[in-house]
Image (cartoon, rainbow, N blue to C red):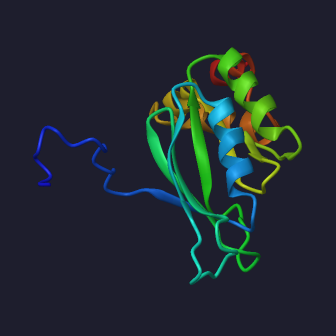
Amino acid sequence: MSATNPTRTQPQPQKITTFLWFDNNAEEAVNFYVSVFKNSRIVGTSHYSDAGPGPKGSVMTIEFELDGERFTALNGGPTFKFTEAISLVVHCETQQEVDYFWEKLSEGGQKVECGWLKDKFGLAWQIVPNFLLELLTSGDNAKTDRVMRAVMSMKKLEIDDLKRAAAGN
């Protein structure tokens, strides 16, 4: 079937997909992530065969979408662990949205600082109000400094506190 065939049943994969390596709990993690984000779904699952390296019939990979963004989770064994060198950023419009994702994703994990958290699977997330990005790109260096000092003093980012910092209060 050609890529331009309009009868294609599978959506064309995105050009770049984030691939997440789990020890043996990819299915649990994916089910958790899909439950947290609206407009999310599991796209497909593959299983290990006789060739391994996982036990025959166990989940090898799960392709899933979180709010339209594709990811793949792999049960790859204990060789690699997540670090903060890679994090997923959740862009939020309101404080209510910040609060929701902060609480849901940090449940069983660790609330770090500056809007960062680690979920119960060890994956790092940044829960960021879009308002912060506007402040940091305003071109006003004094405002940016005040806002960054405020961010550095917070765990969960608070929009009202960022507004006060931007105003110099």
Q: Residue at x 33, y 50 (%)?
A: 14
Q: Residue at x 64, y 18 (%)?
A: 167
Horizontal relation, residue 4 to residue 132: left or right: left
Q: Is residue 26 above or below residue 75?
A: above
Placement of the N terminus among the 4 image quadrants:
bottom left
Horizontal relation, residue 159 to residue 18: left or right: right
| Residue 13 seen in the current view | yes
Which quadrant of the figure has residue 141?
A: top right
Which quadrant of the figure has residue 77?
A: bottom right
Q: Residue at x 63, y 54 (%)?
A: 87
Q: Is residue 17 above or below residue 36?
A: below
Residue 60 rendering spot, x and y as whole percentages: 60, 66
Q: Is residue 53 above or below residue 132?
A: below
Residue 9 rendering spot, x and y as whole percentages: 27, 41
- Of 7 and 71, the residue lying toward us: 7
Q: Is residue 61 above or below residue 165?
A: below
- Of 92 and 33, the residue lying toward us: 33
| Residue 163 seen in the current view | no
